[in-house]
Image (cartoon, rainbow, N blue to C red):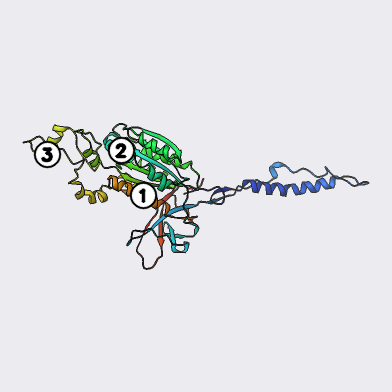
Amino acid sequence: MRKTRNCPGIVWLRVAIACAVCFVSAGPALAQGGASSAAPGRTSTAGQHDTPKTDEIPAVPQIRIESNLVTAPVSVIDKETGQFVYDLTQKDFEILDNGRPQKIANFDRESHKISAVILVQNSRSVTPLLGEIKQLAPIFSQLMLGPKGEAAVITFGSNVQVAQGFSNSGSTLDSTLRRILPSGNKARMNDALMQAINLLQHRPKTERRVIVAFTTGYDSGSETTKNEIIRRATNAEVEIYALALSLTKAYLKTDKQPMNLPTTPENANVTMPAHPGTPNTPSSSMATFGVTVPVTGAIRPAIRGAESKVLSNDAESYARYTGGIFYSQWSAKALQANLSHIATDIHSQYLLAYVPDDLSQIGFHRLEVKVRRPGMKLEIRTRRGYFYEGGE
């Protein structure tokens, strides 16, 4: 939910009301002042009337008008062709707040300046993949940010660090990404996301706020909870896009064995082979190696579908709640293609805005967008809702 300065937001009318009261109160005083200036030959009557006591003047009422503007970036895709639909108008859209149709107050399909925070997990477990991320600056600069957009960079492992403040310099971004080094064995993703949201909240309200996270999708060591991320991101109108770092690919690219990896649904139940002649059981593997390892490439495709549905990670949840996209595939080719698709998605969205007609419910408000386009099967993606905290 976005609170704007003028009509949207919380507008106080104290000054206007106070001025009006002062003007009304000054009327009798001016009249009395005119009477006291007696014409020649007349006796002034000023001072014959008692001055009213201040405690008899009625208190100025305080009137507050609440008007909360909610915005919803919407992506509309033709399911048959996979292409974005660009020729929609306001009358083609319907937006619902907790199931109630709302009047669209603003409709925009122009590209806006982008403020992006790039999050890079630099835990030691994904060190072999950092080299592929370090080459992505041109895609960010040319396709996503454009000539006016700005990006900041945050790295997270055992520590969360702002590696670069907001800048529109492509060379600065390239240099920052290439300087990223491994940092510890934890993955404080939630703390890093919260830091990114804090940075974006101070950006101008007219800018699109985006987070692009390179992460395994699982948190380790953060103080920030999952619910806090969802609440803050939806209320700050931040879209989260995530590209999953593959622990499998990282393991296959490293020459270090055994490798201590964070325990996640992806690697929790797969063990290394035991010594020759020893039964391959979880207990024997743990006794031999002391660690578990990620799923191998041969096994991974078989469980990817179930993992996506049953063991959905936090990064995927954040993307769904905020209207972003989560990509689970990892390869140099897929990485660049997916990042390019994210850039296209950001610049192809419609921006709808409305003032909710019912704010009696405190808490989460569910958003739903419908598009009327007969004869077409459409995929419609927007943020799932926002949290209403109540009047101030």
Picture coordinates of residue 243 (x, y %)? 32, 45
Residue matched to label 2: 131
Disc 3 or disc 1, which is closer to the eye?
1
Q: Residue at x 31, y 46 (%)?
A: 335
Residue 109 place in picture, x, y as percent: 46, 56
Label of residue 391 in the image: none
Upstream in sequence: badge 2 or badge 3 = 2
Q: Position of residue 211 (x, y in %)?
A: 39, 44
Say what secondary structure mark 3 lies in: loop
Q: Is residue 195 visible?
A: no
Q: Secondary structure at mark 2?
A: helix
Q: Earlier in the sequence, mark 1 or mark 2?
A: 2
Q: In the figure, is residue 43 to the left or right of 278?
A: right
Task: Tell me: 49 left or right of 170.
Answer: right
Q: Amino acid at mark 1?
A: Ser
State the residue at coordinates (84%, 44%): 46
Which quadrant of the figure has residue 95? bottom left
Residue identifier under label 1: 340
Q: Amino acid at mark 2?
A: Gly
Residues under labels 1 and 2: Cα distance? 18 Å
Q: Residues within 10 Å of mark 2 (few under 14, many from 20)?
A: few
Q: Separation of disc 3 and disc 1 at Cα?
A: 44 Å
Residue identified by numbered label 3 = 281
Q: Is residue 263 left or right of residue 73?
A: left
Residue 261 against residue 8 in the figure, above or below: above
For residue 243, say whether it is visible: yes
Q: Nearer the viewer, residue 314 or 199?
A: 199
Relative image position of residue 213 (x, y in whole percent): 35, 43
- Closer to the eye: label 2 or 3: 2
